[in-house]
Image (spheres, rainbow, N blue to C red):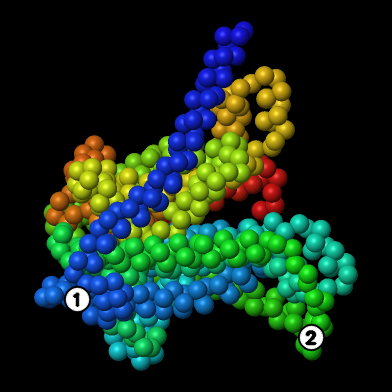
Amino acid sequence: MKELVREQAQTTRRMITSLTVAAALSIAAVVGIYFFLTLNGVKALQFNSLGQILLGTSWDPESTPPKLGLLPMIISTLYVTAIAVAIAFPVSLLCATYLAEFAPTFLRRTLRPAIDMLAGIPSVVYGLFGILTLVPFARYYLGAPSGYSVLVAGIIVAIMILPYMTSVMMEAIRSVPREYVEAALGMGATRWQVVRTVLWPAALSGIAAGGMLGTLRALGETVAVALVAGGALMIPHSPLDPCRPLSAHILLQATVLPVGSPGYYALYFAGLVLMLMVTAVIVITYWYRERAGKPKVRRKVKAGRVNPVLASKLMTGLMIAAGVIAAAALVGITGYIFVNGIGALSWDALFGPVSIGDPVHSSLYPALLGTLALMFYSTVFAVLVGVPTALYLAHFAGESRFTRAVRFAIDTLAGVPSIVYGLFGATLFVVYMKMGYSVLAGALTLATMNLPVVVRTAEEAFRSVPREYIEAARGVGASWYHVVKDVLLPMAKPGITAGITLSMCRAAEEAAPIILTAVMIGLVSSNPFVHVLQPTDALAFRIYLIAKEYLMVPEAKQKAFAAALVLILVTLSLNFLAIYMRDKFERRVGRRV
């Protein structure tokens, strides 16, 4: 008996050690990103001073001496982000409030999945939609000289971040105790007064988190912005001027600058600047959430001059309008792609001849196979690290500096721009680990990017397992190893599965990281599932390449629509599965849908 107890104790210790190591990898990933960006970025200071790089307005890395000014790109980044957040934040807040407190059950069950589906549309599809619709609209009706502009980029990014902000804010509002709402209604407050004086103040921390998530996504959006912003190396003075944000600048230049050139190192410096922006937003949000969580003495709310009943009806109407806007964005974008893509799909388009180096006339089969391979391998790597990290945070991590560091690292990884992951993967996996442009290098890069998705969903699933089950298992003498194996993992399976499907979805839709690590035009692996050390094709890369270089070719637009439709079908199917698993999980733990 003593031997059995000793063996169980050793197994538990080994498990906890493994979980701790897995959790520490998230800290190592953040440190590694900063290390490689700094290691290569500071080399740009050999050619220009810090002031010349940050405040310089000219970019000409091939001149003598090279000009590496990043100020136009920094201002463009802030400009696009400000427009996107200014549009998306109020719409998201009103939509989240309506779905959480006002919408009938049947409408909530319809609108909430629709908004979640909006998050599943790949960014490259947003870019294709923007090029073919919003850019011509801005050119012909708004007076933008070329149509490519800060405004179009801001609108596209606003639509992209809207579902993320809405989802986080809605969860925060739903978590407010119902007793608060019922007490306010019992005292005669209108529904709008309840929202303004009870729900929003109580959910302020979660609302701030939603705003942070949207801001981080706006700062780092790459492919869609690269397609619709115009790529102009100038400081935009008007929303109708073209621009080139930092993320788009890195993507556009990384594929043309030779390794080791002054411009090459300046791109790492630009990535470092982008990471510092991301970290600053996270730190400010942490500070604000802590400040918002402290008790405050609230003044008595004075009665306004506007009729409270009229104000309540007006705000309810605005909330409904916000939900309609979100649903209309989903229907409009997906409907546009479906209508144009159905006619472009054919057997030859999917499984016809493969033309190496010709993305327009080559069939989509290699791109689809490469996408599936990247999805599979990246998700395997992300789950192997993410699920143990989530288990550690949910049940084995105390309140320590290490735990706070892990949580900060997870939040930071969630906000790292995809193009920065591309730089990180290109340095670590492609160069230092000598994988070259390959499926494996791309999959490891995507796994690092998807780690926060897996950790957050799995941690929530583990935390939602009823405490009584754990205590009962421990009470009959089960070790923590058996509690994890026989209780926690089986009961958290739906939530973990939802995280896996979301990770696969994001791996399918990302183009920027794999452009720097896994794909190479003209070189395509015959079987990316087997030849993992060879480059591959991918649907997101194919769409980006056609939209950027070949859209003037008559057949190119049809091939782009066909690839976009296939990619949307893949990602929306995965999102639908994730939503189904999430709802199943919430019903199991007794949460209202």
Dot 2 falls on a residue whose secondary structure is loop
What is the spatial separation of the Cα atoms under label 2 and label 1, in whole angstroms? Answer: 57 Å
Seen in the picture, residue 38 relative to 477 is either above or below; the reply is: below
Decide which of 398, 236 is in the foreground and name it: 398
- What residue is at 45 percent from the left and 36 percent from the top? 21
Q: Which mark is residue 304?
A: 2
For the residue marked with disc 1, what is the amino acid? Lys
Q: Could you say where residue 284 lies in the image, as x and y percent from the top left? A: 53, 66
Q: Could you say where residue 34 lies in the image, as x and y percent from the top left? A: 35, 55
Dot 1 falls on a residue whose secondary structure is strand
Residue 416 visible:
yes
Dividing the picture into quadrants, the one containing residue 201 is bottom right
- What residue is at 52 percent from the left and 19 percent from the top? 10
Q: Which residue is mark 1?
A: 67
Of all residues, the one furthest to the right in this rendering is 187
For the residue marked with disc 2, what is the amino acid? Gly
